[in-house]
Image: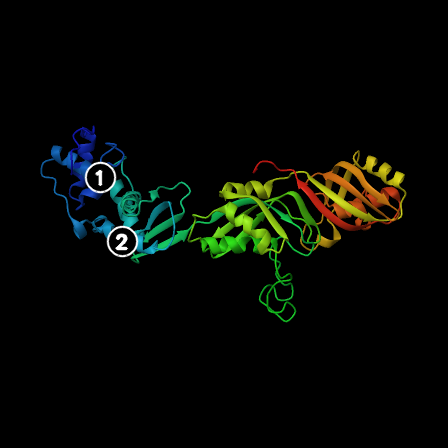
């Protein structure tokens, strides 16, 4: 078992008393040593058993299937290593975790043994097996074992004799610009068939043929061999609105990727050409699940350029905009989204409002607003559901001709 003389572990009288009670339990060296697994740091469980055996003459340990507890499971770790290597073939991973599933009766028998011999230092059979399997998989693959952000999880199902593989998602952060007023942010299932495909959607299952998500995901899926994606955006713009400036932050989650060594910057450079100039992505890089939460929960202010149709003097527009920044807006859930959002009143604020251009019957304004402000409804009034509105302030019907998001003021991910 190697030289273990330098590792301090001198079994106390209490340890030996427990060992005496356990010596008739028909245990192998691994399972016997596990009864004292929290003692003698640096020793393996068989080495702990060896140390105790030096002080307990006559200790007889079983081998292989003769062990009443593990029934030879630790002797078969090498077989499980081969199964892990086969299960992971063709999947790129640098970090992994090993787990195991045991018969409930085995775990109950272990718990009862611990109570019977009265040890406070036992290590669980599952923990010990996972550790030994992980060490040998490390040696066989060169990957790093451990539980911190693994790329893949191997579960040894002992009753079934199989390895179950969970490939963890790959996350990429970036900021997209959308230059097309007919492109939704994410895949939009057909309302008639709910994504199954029908005559109305031409069998595609989609209301719109493409989305920002699908355009961005396509080259990433090709590079990673992933099975699908989820798009996590920091809010979304209307389909007919462009997203300009530095772009909108997002995290793309790639499900079950088989390759992880990709070049995000190279992929991002392909997207403008692949999209026909409709989508651009900046700052694409690897991310982690924490950034999904941050992106989804962030509430940054946003800047807009709005082109408005309405017969109103230039001076009156300027006066109304100066009043807008001094008032809190009460916005009831807009009519256009009332079918999918709770109907309540939300207080919002226009941070800045400036007239960018004016001509008879048409003018452009630039705004900076709090997160969650419905800009079209603030301009038009939405039948009184937004108070005060720009239309209500000037006393003239107004219509939004076009809207661009100029900036999402989030700098955390840059």
Q: Residues within 10 Å of mark 1 (few under 14, many from 20)?
A: many
The spot of residue 391 in percent (x, y) is 84, 45
Q: Quadrant of the N terminus?
A: top left
Q: Residues within 10 Å of mark 2 (few under 14, many from 20)?
A: few
Toward which corner of the image does residue 352 lie, by quadrant?
top right
The spot of residue 93 in percent (x, y) is 38, 48
In the image: residue 100, left or right of residue 224: left
**Circle 2 residue:** 82
Please name the residue shown 57% across and 66% down the image.
196
Toward which corner of the image does residue 249 lie, by quadrant?
top right
Up/down of 412 relative to 130, above or below: above
Q: Nearer the viewer, residue 196 or 62?
A: 196
Query: Which secondary structure lies at badge 2?
Result: helix
**Circle 1 residue:** 45
Please name the residue shown 63% across and 63% down the image.
190
Q: Is residue 183 visible?
A: yes
Q: Is residue 158 visible?
A: no
Please name the residue shown 75% across and 44% down the image.
305
Which label lies toward us, 2 or 1? 2
Separation (CA) of disc 2 from disc 1: 23 Å
The spot of residue 248 in percent (x, y) is 62, 44
Q: Nearer the viewer, residue 397 or 50?
A: 397
């Amino acid at each position: 078992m190697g030289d273990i003389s330098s590792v301090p572990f001198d079994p106390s009288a209490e340890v030996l008393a427990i060992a005496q009670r356990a010596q008739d339990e028909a245990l192998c060296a691994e399972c016997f040593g596990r009864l004292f697994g929290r003692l003698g740091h640096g020793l393996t469980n068989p080495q702990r058993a060896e140390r105790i055996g030096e002080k307990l003459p006559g200790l007889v340990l079983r081998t292989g299937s003769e062990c009443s507890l593990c029934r030879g499971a630790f002797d078969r770790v090498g077989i499980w290593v081969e199964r892990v290597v086969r299960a992971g073939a063709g999947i790129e991973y640098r970090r992994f975790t090993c787990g195991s599933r045991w018969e409930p009766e085995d775990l109950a028998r272990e718990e009862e043994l611990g109570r019977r011999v009265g040890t406070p230092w036992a290590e669980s059979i599952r923990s010990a097996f996972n550790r030994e399997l992980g060490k040998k998989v490390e040696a066989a693959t060169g990957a790093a074992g451990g539980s911190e952000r693994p790329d893949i999880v191997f579960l040894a199902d002992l009753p079934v004799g199989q390895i179950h593989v969970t490939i963890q998602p790959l996350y990429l952060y970036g900021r997209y610009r959308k230059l097309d007023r007919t492109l939704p942010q994410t895949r939009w299932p057909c309302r008639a068939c709910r994504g199954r495909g029908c005559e109305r959607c031409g069998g595609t299952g989609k209301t719109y043929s493409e989305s920002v998500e699908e355009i961005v995901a396509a080259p990433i899926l090709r590079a990673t061999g992933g099975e699908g994606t989820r798009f996590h955006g920091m809010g979304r713009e209307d389909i007919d609105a462009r997203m300009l400036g530095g772009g909108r932050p997002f995290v793309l989650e790639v499900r079950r990727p088989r390759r992880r060594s990709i070049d995000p910057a190279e992929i991002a450079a392909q997207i403008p050409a692949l999209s026909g100039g409709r989508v651009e992505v900046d700052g694409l890089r690897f991310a982690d699940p924490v950034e999904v939460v941050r992106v989804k929960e962030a509430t940054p202010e946003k800047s807009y350029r709005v082109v408005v149709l309405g017969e109103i003097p230039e001076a009156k527009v300027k006066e109304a905009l100066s009043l807008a920044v001094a008032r809190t807006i009460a916005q009831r859930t807009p009519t256009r989204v009332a079918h999918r959002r709770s109907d309540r009143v939300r207080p919002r604020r226009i941070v800045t409002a400036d007239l960018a251009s004016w001509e008879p019957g048409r003018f452009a304004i630039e705004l900076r607003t709090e997160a969650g402000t419905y800009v079209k409804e603030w301009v038009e009034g939405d039948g009184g559901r937004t108070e005060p509105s720009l239309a209500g302030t000037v006393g003239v019907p107004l219509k939004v001709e076009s809207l661009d998001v100029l900036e999402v003021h989030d700098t955390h991910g840059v």
